Each structure stands twice: as structure tokens, then as C-alpha cells.
Image: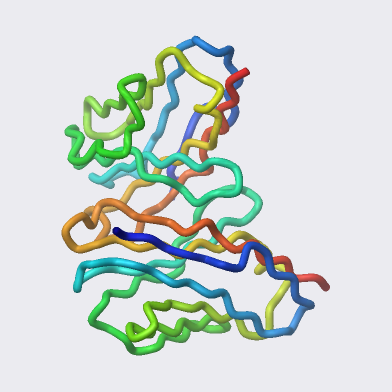
Amino acid sequence: GAGVSQTPSNKVTEKGKYVELRCDPISGHTALYWYRQSLGQGPEFLIYFQGTGAADDSGLPNDRFFAVRPEGSVSTLKIQRTERGDSAVYLCASSLAGVDSPLHFGNGTRLTVT
Amino acid sequence: AQKVTQAQTEISVVEKEDVTLDCVYETRDTTYYLFWYKQPPSGELVFLIRRNSFDEQNEISGRYSWNFQKSTSSFNFTITASQVVDSAVYFCALSEARNTDKLIFGTGTRLQVFP
């Protein structure tokens, strides 16, 4: 079946602009995660959804970052007033029931802020 | 505080060699989970294994094996008879029982297998 799909695969934006990154999880997966991976680093946790609600958003770096999952399936990560330091690969993952089930990751969206 | 250390930044081997990737973790929890993920050039992280802190039995899956030692807080990964397709970045990760939804990743080890 289809895996986790992330769009766009690449996004270049100017400093100060607003961006939205989309994640389509595997059908039936109730848990959804966003991670951020900077060059040469491991992924860093941003936020975790169980169903429609954000169960843990402790990894969001500041209030410029926001994520939604209104119908418990597709999720959108929103970044306002982008800064050059936001440049990274944003990874989405989903699982059947939280970390007790393996996380399935998408290929990520590479965000470049110029 | 929780932390995962992968001291080997990059390893190069020739095909058919065995290679061990090191992982050392820190946690104050007595219940936790350890993971290994593979990230090929395509970028997608692929789950390899999950181990809980109460199960120290070593595991073998084909050419892959894992050695979990609580006494040294290590969870090392060995690939036997490496192949070119094993070339990737490998990440070790930790989650704690009180916060199982959050994986803490190491910085990864880039493995290059040459023919």
C-alpha cells in the first residue's frame, strides 16, 4: 500500500514568508509525528498527534510554528515569518498506535529559506 | 537528561566485511525503548528494530544483529558480510516510558560499503 506522502518534496522561500508543509499518513494510522532534520544531524521531535488533537507539541521551537490535523488524517505544518535557521528537512511519520507501533516515515520536505 | 551518542560519524568498508555501529544512550528512566533506523539516500527513515529495556537478549535478523548491554548503556548494531546496498546513514534512537511518543535520535553514522 501507499506509504507516508509529503508535499512538496522541496520548498524554497524567502525570509519572512509563510509556508505550509503537508503530510498524508498511511491510511488507518491514528498517530502522526513531525520531526525536523538539520544537515548532519538526527531528526528532532516537533509535535505528535493522536487523532485530531496535538498530544505533545513540546518540540515546536517557537510560536512561529503551528501544526493541524483537522480530520485526523492529513496534517499541515505551518511556519510563519520564516527565518534562515528554519532551513531543514521536515519529516512526517505515522503509526497505528503511537510508539508501540513502528513509525513509518515519509521522504520529507526540504525547506530552504533564502 | 536523555541522550543518544553515536561517536562514529562515518565508516567505510569493503563489501563482505563485517561492521559494527556503536550507540551509547543516557536516561534516568528504568523503562525505555531503543531503536535503530536506516536512512538511505532517498531520505526515508526505515525502521529496523525496537528493543525494550527489560529485554537484553541479543537479536539476529539475517545479516543484522544487535547487542544490547545495560551495564554499559550500549545498543550496538552489527552488519555481517556487508553489501553495497547497506550504504546509508544509520540512526540509533531512544524513547522513555514516561514519554513514549518522542524519539530522541543520535547524530547518525554514515556507512559506505565499497564494491
Could you say which quadrant of the image residue A31 lies in?
top left
Give the x, y percent position of residue A94. 34, 47
Q: Quadrant of the N terminus of chain B?
A: bottom left
Return the residue found at the far bottom: B57
- Asked if A34 appears above or below B110 in the picture, the reply is above
- Asked if A79 appears above or below B37 in the picture, the reply is above
Could you say which quadrant of the image residue A66 lies in?
top left
Horizontal arrangement in the rendering, residue B69 relative to residue B31 (left or right):
right
- Asked if A54 appears above or below B54 in the picture, the reply is above
* Residue sitting nearer the eye, A25 or B32: B32
Horizontal arrangement in the rendering, residue A99 relative to residue A21 (left or right):
left
Give the x, y percent position of residue B87. 68, 65
* Residue sitting nearer the eye, B78 or B29: B29
Horizontal arrangement in the rendering, residue A89 relative to residue B85 (left or right):
left
Could you say which quadrant of the image residue B111 lies in?
bottom right
Give the x, y percent position of residue B88. 64, 61
Return the residue found at the far front: B1
The residue lying at 58 percent from left, 23 percent from top is A11
- Asked if A51 appears above or below B58 in the picture, the reply is above
* Residue sitting nearer the eye, A98 or A71: A98
The residue lying at 79 percent from left, 77 percent from top is B14
The residue lying at 43 percent from left, 56 percent from top is B105
Give the x, y percent position of residue B99. 20, 55
Return the residue found at the far right: B115
